[in-house]
Amino acid sequence: MAETPSMISKIVKRNGTVVPYDRDRITTAIFKAAASVGGSDRAKAEELSIKVERAVAGTYGEHSIPTVEDIQDLVEQTLIEEGHARTSKAYILYRARQAEARESRQLQGEYTDNIPYKKIYDTLRWNMAHGCETIEGINRIIADGNYADLVRAVEKRYDEEVALGAEQMLDRIPGVRIVIIAGPSSSGKTTTTIKASEKLASRGIKLKAINVDHYFFDLEMHPKDEFGDYDYETPQALDLELIDQHLTALLEGKRIKTPHYDFKTGKRELDVHEMQLEDNEIVLIDSLHGLYDAMTQSIPAENKFRLYIETLGQVRTDDGIFLRWADNRLMRRMIRDSWHRNLQPLQTLTHWHYVRRSELRNIIPFISSVDYVVNSAMPHELPIMKNKLFKYFPEGMSLYKDNPKRQDAYVRAKRVHDMLHGLTEMPTDKDIPEKSLLREFIGGSQYSY
């Protein structure tokens, strides 16, 4: 069935761009709808997607270029005609939810994940100016022997962004008592925190970081899903009340003792690390949930400076498909988890749905309140990521393709695989500086994490 040639080669997206047609996306959508009502036969979903293609050809002509909406309409029609009314209803509900989400994004204005388009456009312009806005461009840079030059340029851009953010923090002192560096998983919060600390220290401001990771509850208290996996990504996995109490005490000049959390045992010990603010010191927090109000609810807004960091990458394939920011961070975390948290890369892949769910619920809604945004995407990291990770994505696709409960992992694995497939890999990280943000994930950093 998979070898049946498609009569569709391209489709028109909602924004008017023409992109290659991918049957697997239709198959997966049908399979997920069927799974939601108890189905488990991916082969049947693929058979139905082929019938959808035939319906498209019969309606619009063979080798036509239909729109996304045209195809989705015919998916509904085909499901009903083939006797899959319950699946059709589930698919219709899915389309409705997607439409509501699009409308909500439009009402928010010119934002992607609440990031102003100007910031994204500036990133794209920078990439274009340095020839690294496409997979082909990065390949050309490597082939021409200019990879090390790209590394230096990207590292310089990132360092300058962090330094400018630190300058804005300095402008608001002494009012600011807490600096929050927040961002989604594997965006580079820790390295950004260290570099901002260095900049502020050079101006006589002493920083004292509070390690929020030590405030995790014991692992057995974390929520689980149907697979029995623990969820580190929800803010409720943290002792938010204790964090807020400790921050208040610190600003009042009191001495506290923070907990210690061991990720390998999943246990925390209370009252371990002593901490107190001295003269000219401010609290520095780098946390996935730094923007979540309950963490700092007792601290007045004028006493907080919020810096947000995200991989605002603008790298695309020859077909115009952009690397998703979350996929960039997924690859970083797959590597880091393997040596820092003793997890296999595919475990990180299957856990990632927690990450995105928590980001969309507990991080993205609060980005509009931040004072400054840093882009941590580094185009030169992609060839290194391919070398370290590419072998896992075909394995993930094979393992999860027919599992109705693991479709999220399958879709992500296929998407990243397709993005990296044509990229030249970099077999060594010798050109990456010891103070690079990338070292936070691949190891070998001069910094201690």
Image (cartoon, helix red, strand yellow):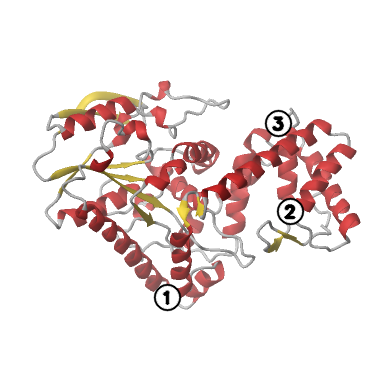
Q: Quadrant of residue 245?
A: top left
Residue 158: horizontal and vertical position, in percent? 34, 61
Give the SS element for disc 3: loop
The label nearer to you, 3 versus 2, is 2
Front residue of this view, candidates 185 and 303:
303
Q: Residue furthest top?
A: 221
The label nearer to you, 1 versus 3, is 3
Q: Which mark is residue 36?
A: 3
Q: Which residue is mark 1?
A: 146
Whether residue 300 appears in this view of the structure is: yes
Front residue of this view, candidates 348 and 279:
279
Q: Is residue 57 left or right of residue 252?
A: right
The relative height of residue 336 versus residue 18 in the rendered view (above or below) is above
Neighbor class of circle 1 (other Cα within 10 Å; few <14, some 14-19, many 20+) is: few
Residue 312: horizontal and vertical position, in percent? 45, 57
**Real-space CA distance between mark 2 and mark 1, rounded to the nearest whole angstrom:** 40 Å
The relative height of residue 150 versus residue 300 in the rendered view (above or below) is below
Give the SS element for disc 1: loop
Q: At 20% from the left edge and 54% from the top edge, which residue is drawn?
A: 170
The relative height of residue 180 versus residue 237 in the rendered view (above or below) is below
Mark 1: amino acid: Asn
Q: In the picture, which quadrant includes the C terminus?
A: top left
Mark 2: amino acid: Val
**Real-space CA distance between mark 1 and mark 3, rounded to the nearest whole angstrom:** 49 Å
Q: Which residue is mark 2?
A: 68
Q: At 73% from the left edge and 58% from the top edge, which residue is drawn?
A: 21
Front residue of this view, candidates 188 and 196:
196
Q: At 27% from the left edge and 24% from the top edge, which residue is drawn?
A: 269
